[in-house]
Image (cartoon, rainbow, N blue to C red):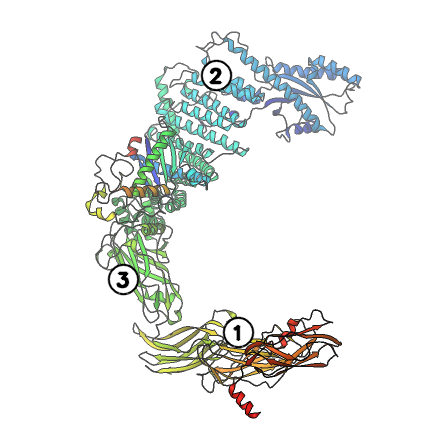
Amino acid sequence: MSPTQWDLPVELCCRPMAFVTLTGLDVVYNAVHRAVWDAFCANRRADRVPISFKVLPGDHEYPKCRPKRTSYEWYIPKGILKTGWMNKHLNLVPALVVVFYELDWDEPQWKEKQSECATRVEIVRQSLQGRNTKVAVVLIQKKTPLPPGEDVIASERAAALCNACELSGKSLFVLPHTDHLVGYIIRLENAFYEHAQTYYYTEIRRVKSHKEFLNKTTHQLLFVRHQFKIAFFSELKQDTQNALKNYRTAYNLVHELRAHETNILEIKTMAGFINYKICRLCFQHNTPLDAIAQFRKHIDLCKKKIGSAELSFEHAAWMSKQFQAFGDLFDEAIKLGLTAIQTQNPGFYYQQAAYYAQERKQLAKSLCNHEASIMYPNPDPLETQTGVLDFYGQRSWRQGILSFDLSDPEKEKVGVLAIQLKERNVAHSEIIITLLSNAVAQFKKYKCPRMKSHLMVQMGEEYYYAKDYTKALKLLDYVMCDYRSEGWWTLLTSILTTALKCSYLMAQLKDYITYSLELLGRASTLKDDQKSRIEKNLINVLMNESPDPEPDCDIFAVKTAQKLWADRISLAGSNIFTIGVQDFVPFVQCKAKFHAPSFHVDVPVEFDIYLKADCPHPIRFSKLCVSFNNQEYNQFCVIEEASKANEVLENPTQGKMCLVPGKTRKLLFKFVAKTEDVGKKIEITSVDLALGNETGRCVVLNWQGGGGDAASSQEALQAARSFKRRPKLPDNEVHWDSIIIQASTMIISRVPNISVHLRHEPPALTNEMYCLVVTVQSHEKTQIRDVKLTAGLKPGQDANLTQKTHVTLHGTELCDESYPALLTDIPVGDLHPGEQLEKMLYVRCGTVGSRMFLVYVSYLINITAEEKEIVCKCHKDETVTIETVFPFDVAVKFVSTKFEHLERVYADIPFLLMTDLLSASPWALTVVSSELQLAPSMTTVDQLESQVDNVVLQTGESASECFCLRCPSLGNVEGGVATGHYIISWKRTSAMENIPVIRTVITLPHVIVENIPLHVNADLPSFGRVRESLPVKYHLQNKTDFVQDVEISVEPSDAFMFSGLKQIRLRILPGTEQEMLYNFYPLMAGYQQLPSLNINLLRFPNFTNQLLRRFIPTSIFVKPQGRLMDDTSIAAA
Amino acid sequence: MAVCIAVIAKENYPLYIRSTPTENELKFHYMVHTSLDVVDEKISAMGKALVDQRELYLGLLYPTEDYKVYGYVTNSKVKFVMVVDSSNTALRDNEIRSMFRKLHNSYTDVMCNPFYNPGDRIQSRWALLPVSASSPGGPYSRVRIQSRWALLPVSDPVQVGPTSCVRIQSRWALLPVSDPVQVGPTPVSDPVQQGL
């Protein structure tokens, strides 16, 4: 019994191919033959026909054919399938024997050669006596043959040769040894293949012909055997469909066999074989579901066929093999292009195979626990004469015995014992691990991470059983984090327990401590007695002693381990282990919390470290240190107790170095921050808690940041969600869940004790020197030094504001672009307690809008904090938003001399420019002066004198000016003609004398200038009087270079009588003026319409009266006749 | 008859897991844990299907030689896993479905309990599975807490699936504040009991 007893035979697992032997080839000494043989062997790809070739000598002895049985009546088969049968037909009995012979058609010694060839054929025929194997002859020729039918000699001699060899013409081939050897060989091959198929066809017919002789009572086994043979021959014939059909029939027949304890193994073996074939063919036919269904059926049928209870491990081994073989088939099919899915992949079969292998191990353990004194039986009942069994699946000590009764119970007993003793030597763990690792590879491929982890746990456990603790630990350690991160504590605890055993048995200190820490922690689901045992061991280890062995360990392994532990104790060396806790759940929890998110530099920074132990007994720690991002603080935050190692358990409840299970221990730390750290963050980078002592062994638990381990984030989340009210605790105790880690704090500067006041009169006016009075008063108890003032536009605002804002300390001169927007660090000097200081700032804002101004006062002061003298820099800032507005609005309009609004002015004709200054400032403004700067294109009609000098304007008041201007003709200017600038000099009325006057320049609007052909203006008094003559003189000026024909008529008015030309036509020469004199005589008092003057220019039909009427008054005020006047006039008269 | 029932939180840690053959509990823990591979895959395959069209029942997750593992996922991604003996042919898809539905109802009852914090491991053994008849009304029948729960806010809607949220509201609305007997999951004949 080889260890591979359960492996399927090779001949079963291979793909059956037609077997053809080649004789007459001397592949060693003959180069031509070698080339022919190579052409047969080389490049056997899928496109070549499936044949397996073998070169044999011409006189090779083929297996003898047994004489034909004429009757099956008295024949009783001894088993289902002979072990040699498959191999015989795959490798021993050919379908075709080819005789190679060198012979050219023009061979001079033809006769002799022909008979030699015939002899060779005869020899082959002799050795194949009784078989249906075909024989073919291939003539190796040196010459290229002529096309068929042309070579008369060839066809004659071929016929003769066939005759001599008793061959049909179809079995004679010619192989010219020329350039196209491979092509010829492929054609030959195809011909051989046809012959082989015919052979297998006849074989199938032959086997089928036996069937009719069989009867169901005695020949049950033969039914299976024949069906199997038919199927196998069909496979050799490459008829896989029929092969599958026949295998299925065979499978059903196997299960119809009468099963008994004695033959159950044979039945199962055959069923396994046939099942393998069916599944294989189903995969080959790309019907994987059929394969799976067949396999399921197979397993369901065979699962319960355990057979002998004493050898039940054999059944498990067989089951395991079935699953493994199916997994292999499935995997192979996938490699050939089949797609598997997550829930149906080879991994499941390997897993199940591993499961049965485990069962096999269990069974073997219980069944094969013979005492060492029991010797292996001699003679070996498992030995056979030939070394192999005759039939598959039979017992070697009773081969061929079909009776269900045990003829020799003693022999049976010895046989069973031999098998059991053999089973004891099987490396079960190895088998299991191989299967598991196969399964792991599959599940990895099909996205089953958890299944993978589970299998790896099993592998680890198996390695543990196999005493390969290093590998076990490696695997277990690898998967632990998966279970930890998903919070499956039961599973984690189970894995940790195994891992702890491994690390104990190897005396791996660090691992042992790590696993103990976690098994004591809150993630562990161990019972308290277990926990206290582990804790005791841990304390032992920390005191440099050996721990007690873990329960359920192998006794021998424990002994080795104890020695190892003893060695560890004597071994000098580093006994400090630093363990990062962020990756696991230790039994001490830690949370760090600063009392505030920020601390002033003059107050000590305070924080608490909360510790909580989850182990069953109180534990003492030896040292606690906190590390910061600024390492200078580390020295202040260390708690250390010089305790001897053996004190760990004594007085456990006293002192702050002791952690009582379930109670939260709070440790307060305090230190003074450095002044350099103002504005910086102080962060706890790690918390280190040392257990044990450096003289013994010391474990440093290292929390990154402010505490927290692998499970704490989820716990914090749950605690945050919870709305449970926590039971009340006595003072100075807190609920663990309610502590929130705060691992960093800001150091901020000391609170200033000065006051900064700003005095000003908002809003600011554009461009003025706005005065801002800053008052700083010290309320400090001691003198403050180095007071500095930074003032101006607050940085971070619109960049344009920076350009248009200027700050100066000197208000007496206007500041320009060169002045900055922010004055920094103006030294002010020292201030005594209570002293006050005033500083004036002038701000000039070039644009309107709101601005933020910053006034920042910094100073130094000496402070004592925690008995330490420190120099604090304090500062206070004030910001103020100041609105800037235009001081006034200036409105400019053009009007005619009649004060009528003008949209355009007329060349050479005087018009009025009116300015209107409306104060928008909430404060009184003084207009110091105003000035009109005319553009060159404009001329003034009279003096340009300011009319608003020294006018004070209150809010909403306005100051107007009026200038009479004239614009000479300039031709047509696009966009109008520039008028000039209007300059206003002003200041706040409240401003001091030395504050400069601000000049605001207003660009006057452009005006459109238009030429007119005729200008009319009228000279008339400002008023008339009833019944008093009113002389009116019209001046008509020709503004063109032409002589103008003018028609003038005067329309009468009810209010006037008049004298003068009523209708006239006249000519006006270019550039000259014509005067028209009328004498109006008013008849009515009041505002009266004048008789209208209609002017018609014959050259300019477009020129209308409408336009002219702008220049001449249309009405006049007529005063009534005054009596007094009358009297005086009479008197004068 | 289910041999193992498990309720798994959204984050894939077990909220509740019980198996009837208690001697090999670990095996069932592993089985439930590994079945989450398939659950995850099925959930991601469902993708963003419309909520009301989504089938909560995931069907057979994977077969083993001796057991069948079925899955169910609530709208709030809480998973139910049930392990059934392979040999039990009486349990077909419909039976499994109705068992899951009953389990879902029981779970909703647990969620309705104002003293249960969603995400906590379900401690009370009788909540989902009946252990024995001796369970005395549970811890919520104490008189002291009667007056308090009326003031407690309806459970955070984010923690609870949309359907259970609706359920809670209706439950609360129907429950008279003063009635002390109705508080907590009432010890009605547990639905799973019939399934088991």
**Chain letter belonging to callout 1:** A
Residue A41's place in the image compared with A856, above or below, is above
User: Amino acid type of disc 3?
Assistant: Ala
Q: Which residue is mark 1?
A: A803
Q: Chain of mark 2?
A: A
Can residue A555 be seen from the camera position used here? no
Do badges 1 and 2 share one subunit? Answer: yes
Q: Secondary structure at mark 1?
A: helix
Residue in front for this viewpoint, A976 or A823: A976
Q: Where residue A1053 appears, x then y in whole percent?
A: 61, 75
The residue that mark 2 highlights is: A224
Name the amino acid type tagged 2. Val
How crowded pointer 2 is (Cα within 10 Å; few <14, some 14-19, many 20+) is rated as: many
Q: Secondary structure at mark 2?
A: helix
Label 1 with label 2: CB-CB less than 8 Å: no
Measured along the vertical axis of the image, is residue A1055 above or below residue A63? below
Q: Residue furthest left?
A: B143
Label 1: how many residues lie within 10 Å, few (<14), some (14-19) or many (20+)? some
Q: Residue at x 32, y 78 (%)?
A: A780
Could you say which is closer to the camera, residue B94 or residue B157? B157
Which callout, 2 or 3, points at the residue further toward the start of the chain? Answer: 2
Q: Nearer the viewer, mark 2 or mark 3?
A: 2
- Relative vertical location of residue A843 with respect to residue A186 in this rendering, above or below: below
Which residue bears the numbered disc 3?
A642
| Coordinates of residue A141 in the picture (x, y in percent) | 74, 23
Q: Splitting the image into 4 quarters, where does residue A638 fall?
A: bottom left
Give percent across and percent down for residue A862.
34, 77
